[in-house]
Image (cartoon, grey):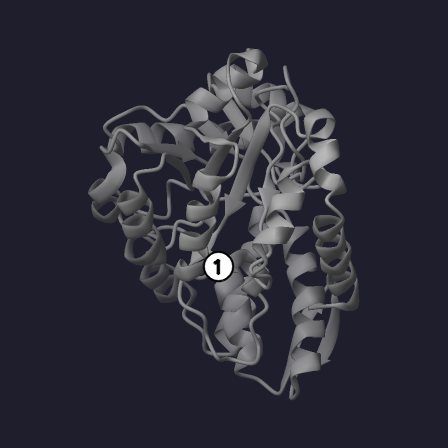
Amino acid sequence: MSLGTDWTALKLELAYASGLWRLLEPSRGGAGIILKFERVRPARDAAFQPLKASEITPQFLHRVIKSLKRWPLDIVSMDEACRRVQAPQSGRRFVALTFDAATRDFLDYAWPLLSGHQVPFTLYLPSAFPDGLGRMWGLALEQVIAGQDRINVVVDDVRRYFETADIAGKYLAHHYLDGWLRSLPPRALDVAIDDLCLRYDVDLGALSREAAMTWDDVAVFAADPLVTIGTSTLHHAILANLDDATAKREMAMGQAVAQAALPVSPRHFAYPFGDKTAFGARDVAMAAEQGFTSAVTSVPGVVKPAASLHALPRLAWDGRRSSLRILRVMMSGWM
């Protein structure tokens, strides 16, 4: 973890030890919390893991659920969370569990735990991925950098070279290239990642199909009454990088494809990536017009009473941490 991340963790640990968060929770805790998790899989030994912040282990998920059951919170579905946001005096503070990754790891590691604990949760699917048409370019970028001592890429018509023989160089290259790729519109992103994969012998299609759940996988748990399946854009495209017509089509097609494949029409939406640069007021209005009951972001925060249901904040857990004390303080609204 970076020094900044370590300092934040230290402050949260000190806040827990002081007990002040308990005094502030009634005024800062809001109506409840929506927790965001992504990939759930066993820990790996690889030195270069640029996506580790978005991963948690099955063991940690098990610990989280056990703790949530002890804490003074109700674990609820997204439908119930929306009801409580609109009528915040109708119950205790809530926590809703949400998962963004459409990877097969969810079926192998997360679903058995969630089912065993009998807790509700929501899974957001980019609908092209279970059809084998998704492009998990983040996994491809990681594989390219992991396998090379030096890479080059054309950025804004200028060829850039990155020395990636050591771990520090790999992380620097990943930080730069990941940010650059996220800023590109879909066609330019496809060209850039395809060029990298071609020159460094990474099969993006095969990598994505191997990692993604199929609709048969989703069917294993989709009919469970504790499960809510939501959608994202069809190809997990960042809405801020799309024009109006394309953004509307991506949102509508993501919903339509999922509706055709699922036993219940999807009512909840997640903005891809979801930070403040990934969506805007246009997209919030579009999600409401599309008929979604809610739309969640990745903007951190607790859910305030009467909050906009189409721009709900979530607390994303950093998978490089393992302290439940930190999680408890974050959920109190301390930050």
Callout 1 amino acid: Ile
Q: Pinpoint residue 104: horizontal percent, then vertical percent.
A: 32, 56
Residue plotted at (65% across, 78% down): 170
Residue plotted at (73% across, 73% down): 159
Left or right of 229, for residue 71: right
Q: Quadrant of residue 150?
A: bottom right
In the rendered view, would you say 255 is above or below 18? above
Image quadrant for the N terminus? bottom right
Q: Relative to the observer, which residue lies in front, 82 or 165? A: 82
Left or right of 25, for residue 98: left
Q: Pinpoint residue 199: horizontal percent, then vertical percent.
A: 53, 77
Image quadrant for the C terminus? top right
Disc 1 packing (10 Å; few <14; some 14–19; many ≥20): many
Residue plotted at (25% across, 44% down): 215
Query: Residue beneath label 1, please?
Result: 56
Q: Pinpoint residue 262: horizontal percent, then vertical percent.
A: 26, 32
Residue plotted at (44% across, 62% down): 57
In the rendered view, would you say 317 is above or below 23? below
Residue 124: in sight, yes or no?
yes
